[in-house]
Amino acid sequence: MNNSITFVSFLGSSLATVKVKNTIYVCMKSVVNGIGLDWSTQHRKFRGCYQKYGCGFLSIPVKNGTKKFW
């Protein structure tokens, strides 16, 4: 499987997106911080209702292995 990582501009920051099987995923922590919300509160909400929001963990290859993003 060939995953494509792309960076997009979001409120003056750069967000990493990953395309897997024609679906584009984004790291929610970057979005939450970008709009000025508290990550710990939003993370708790996402974890409590992850199916409602379509959230989950995504492992992304990095220089020293993989990193797990929420």
Image: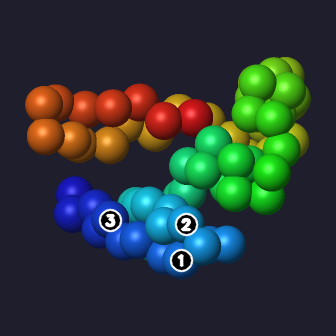
The amino acid type of the residue labelled 1 equals Ser
As displayed, is residue 1 above or below residue 29?
A: below
SS type, badge 1: strand
Check whether the beta carbons of the residues at disc 2 and disc 1 lie within 8 A of each other.
yes
- In the picture, the disc for residue 29 is none
- Residue 32: x and y in percent read 74, 48
Check whether the beta carbons of the residues at disc 1 and disc 3 lie within 8 A of each other.
no
Q: Give the quarter of the image for residue 47.
A: top right
The amino acid type of the residue labelled 3 equals Ile
Q: What is the CA distance from the residue labelled 3 to the residue labelled 2? A: 16 Å
- In the picture, the disc for residue 9 is 1
Q: Give the quarter of the image for residue 44.
A: top right
Please name which of the two marks, 1 or 3, marks the residue nearer to the observer: 1
Question: What residue is disc 2 on?
Answer: 13
Q: What is the CA distance from the residue labelled 1 to the residue labelled 3? A: 14 Å
Question: What residue is disc 3 on?
Answer: 5
Identified at 32% across, 65% down, the residue is 5
The amino acid type of the residue labelled 2 equals Ser
Name the quadrant of the C terminus. Answer: top right
Identified at 22% across, 58% down, the residue is 1
Q: Residues within 10 Å of mark 2 (few under 14, many from 20)?
A: few
- Residue 35: x and y in percent read 79, 58
Left or right placement of residue 70 versus residue 4 in this view: right
Residue 35 visible here = yes
SS type, badge 3: strand
Q: Compare marks 3 and 2 and give the one earlier in the sequence.
A: 3
